[in-house]
Amino acid sequence: MEVPAGSGGCHGQVRSGLEPIKKVAGTIKDHLWGILKAAVLEVVMVRQKVSKAESR
């Protein structure tokens, strides 16, 4: 099946398929510091619990 010239063909489909990925990437970028803080805080809390358990 031939795609008419100027219709975009598969490029439009690929572009529309990438939009959700771009949206997620933008959300991660906007909230990156909060995500990192939460991850670091979780690691610190786990280490504190392990330290307390080892000292008993």
Image (spheres, rainbow, N blue to C red):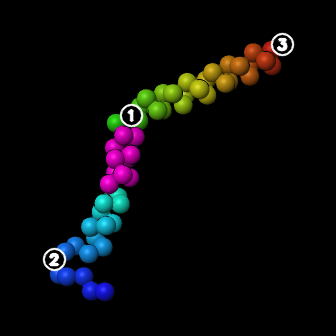
Q: Which sits in the foreground, 41 or 11?
A: 11
Residue 6 disc label: 2
Which callout, 2 or 1, points at the residue further toward the start of the chain?
Answer: 2
Q: Which sits in the foreground, 30 or 21?
A: 21
Is there a contact, CB below 8 Å, between mark 2 and mark 1? Answer: no
Which residue is identified by label 3? 56
* Magenta residue check for 26: yes
Q: Which residue sits at x=32%, y=54%? A: 19
Residue 37 as seen in the image, left or right of residue 44: left
Is there a contact, CB below 8 Å, between mark 3 and mark 1? Answer: no
Q: Amino acid at mark 2?
A: Gly
User: The magenta stretch spans which residues?
Assistant: 19-29
Magenta: main secondary structure equals helix
- Residue 54: x %, y % from top left: 80, 19
Which residue is identified by label 1? 31
| Residue 2 vertical position relative to residue 47 in the rendered view, above or below | below
Q: Amino acid at mark 1?
A: His
Q: Amino acid at mark 3?
A: Arg
Find numbered disc 2 in the image and state the secondary structure of the residue it sits on: loop
In which image quadrant can residue 12 be found? Answer: bottom left
